[in-house]
């Protein structure tokens, strides 16, 4: 049986362009999950949670803090993009984070990340930037953009 870490890494291998250096290696993901405050979600090509030996089309990795949940990574295999899976992953994250007590989601991304439109359509708004935070494989410096998304007023019935 394929384990979930294998599924995450399978998505990671194709979802992230190596030029940007955004993909994590297996050890980084495994170490994060050992901390206890990191969580993952796997989605199938059909848009449902992965079960059994089913293939993963995408995943999210997040970290819980006091009343906040930080989206560390979200990836969808290229052949499954533009099918609503990214939005479905964010919906699942919002619900799980709210159940863990989070009142808002946070994320950081490089300027020019094409996923920015997905996040903004979902309700994320800009809260800051870090100048020249990221470095590409060729040494170019790129700003990091930080975003937040309010989850709810504590009432899960509106999710």
Image (cartoon, helix red, strand yellow):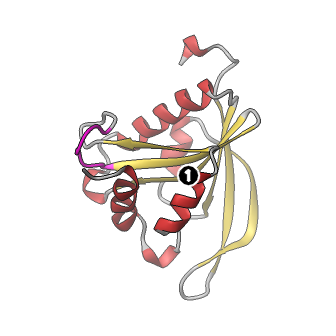
Tell which of 158 and 55 is nearer to you.
55
* 15 is higher (above) or lower (below) than 53: below
Whether residue 24 appears in this view of the structure is no
The residue identified by callout 1 is: 33
Closer to the camera, 106 or 52? 52
Seen from the viewer's position, the closer of residues 34 and 58 is: 34
Residue 122 is at least partly visible in this image:
yes
Left or right, 64 with respect to 62, comes to right
Residue 23, percent from left and from top: 49, 67
Q: Does 124 appear in magenta?
A: no
x 35%, y 58%: residue: 6
Span highlighted in magenta in the image: 50-57
When asked about the image quadrant of residue 13, the answer is bottom left
Q: Provide residue 101's location: percent of width, then percent of height.
A: 68, 27
Which secondary structure lies at badge 1?
A: helix
Q: Residue at the location (28% across, 53% down)?
A: 2
In percent of width and height, residue 74 lies at 48, 51
As rendered, which of 153 and 67 lies closer to the eye? 67
Q: Name the side, left or right, on which 51 lies relative to 28.
A: left
| Residue 71 percent coordinates (x, y) | 59, 47
The total of numbered circles placed on residues is 1
Instruction: In the rendered view, tell whether residue 137 sits above or below residue 123.
Output: below
Name the residue located 48 percent from the left edge and 47 percent from the top edge: 60
Q: Give the dominant element type of the magenta stretch: helix, strand or loop.
A: loop
Q: Is residue 65 above or below residue 8?
A: above
Side of 130 where 37 appears, left or right = left
- Say which quarter of the image contains residue 36: top right
Mark 1 residue crowding within 10 angstroms, few (<14) / some (14–19) / many (20+): some
């Amino acid at each position: 049986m394929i384990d979930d870490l294998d599924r995450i890494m399978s998505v990671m291998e194709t979802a992230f362009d190596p030029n940007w250096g955004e993909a994590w290696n297996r050890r980084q993901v495994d170490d994060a999950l050992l901390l206890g405050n990191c969580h993952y979600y796997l989605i199938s090509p059909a848009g449902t949670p992965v079960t059994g030996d089913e293939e993963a089309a995408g995943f999210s990795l997040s970290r819980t803090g006091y009343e906040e949940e930080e989206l560390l990574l979200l990836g969808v295999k290229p052949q499954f993009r533009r099918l609503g899976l990214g939005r479905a992953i964010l919906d699942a994250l919002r619900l799980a984070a709210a159940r863990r007590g989070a009142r808002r989601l946070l994320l950081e991304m490089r300027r020019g990340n094409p996923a920015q439109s997905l996040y903004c359509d979902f309700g994320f708004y800009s809260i800051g930037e870090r100048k020249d935070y990221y470095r590409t494989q060729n040494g170019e410096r790129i700003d990091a953009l930080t975003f937040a998304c309010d989850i709810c007023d504590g009432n899960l019935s509106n999710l």
